[in-house]
Image: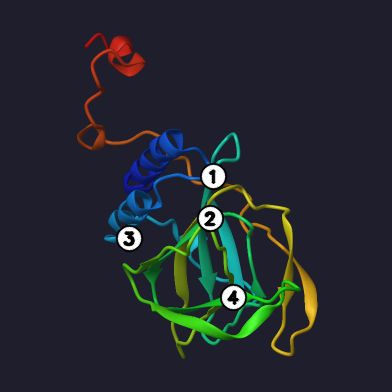
Amino acid sequence: MSLEPLRRFVQAASLAVNVGGHTAPPLQLLAWQLRTLLSSDDWLPEELAHPRRGSSTYLLYADPVDRFSVVSYVTEPGFRSPTHDTGVWSLFGQLRGEHLLRLHGRREDGRPVAAAQALRLRPGSVVQPPPDDLPLFQIDNPGAQDPGIGIHVYGGVLGGLQSPSFDEQGGEHTHVFSYANAWIPNLWGRRPAAARPEAPPGSWRALASGT
């Protein structure tokens, strides 16, 4: 297993956020880069690929100044999340299994409208909700046997964030975002020489190596 695909995605996402700012990065470019990350599924550590008590959110990367984050969202078969939102732009990608993503509009009082756009996410799928009209969303695992693993990118680090959530009967609750892992992958650990890209001329890495 190599974390190189995730490291490359994080670098590309950082550059994209630098260009557009954390509130308006080029999301179509980020979606394309996320599809590239999802083209292989052997990079996710096994410890971050198993759900606990229905679902687990594992933090894979958190930008140091809170501009974006990358998580794996892992669900058991038959699991259904409450309807909630994040308050920031997001990208929903699928690494393994299936998820059914329901996007709800909002009433004037902030509650979800009954009808929803239902999108089936299979491995390699990426959904980009409109950043200027953020929907409420709900995620189901429609499978009977297999866990579902989504790779989500958010326009902020959501740990500890509280937002309204709604159950099937329309009751309002508070959803608190939290992470199930006590450690995050070391994207800059030792890699085989063949996996190390050539340092750009003039970079500190090139200067340190004398190239």
The residue singled out by tag 4 in the image is 105
Q: Is residue 107 above or below residue 154?
A: below
Q: Position of residue 85 (x, y in %)?
A: 63, 66
Q: Are marks 3 and 1 in contact (CB under 8 Å)?
A: no
- Residue in view at x 34 percent, y 42 percent: 8
Q: Are marks 1 and 2 in contact (CB under 8 Å)?
A: yes
Q: Residues within 10 Å of mark 3 (few under 14, many from 20)?
A: many
Q: Is residue 190 above or below residue 41?
A: above
Which label sits in the foreground, 3 or 2?
2
Q: Residues within 10 Å of mark 1 (few under 14, many from 20)?
A: some
Which label sits in the foreground, 3 or 1?
1
The residue singled out by tag 3 in the image is 38
Q: Position of residue 104 (x, y in %)?
A: 58, 77
Left or right of 166? Residue 30 is left
Mark pair 4, 1: CA separation: 21 Å
The residue singled out by tag 1 in the image is 23
Quarter of the image for residue 82 reads bottom right
Q: Amino acid at mark 3?
A: Leu
The residue singled out by tag 2 in the image is 89
Q: Residues within 10 Å of mark 2 (few under 14, many from 20)?
A: many
Left or right of 40? Residue 185 is right
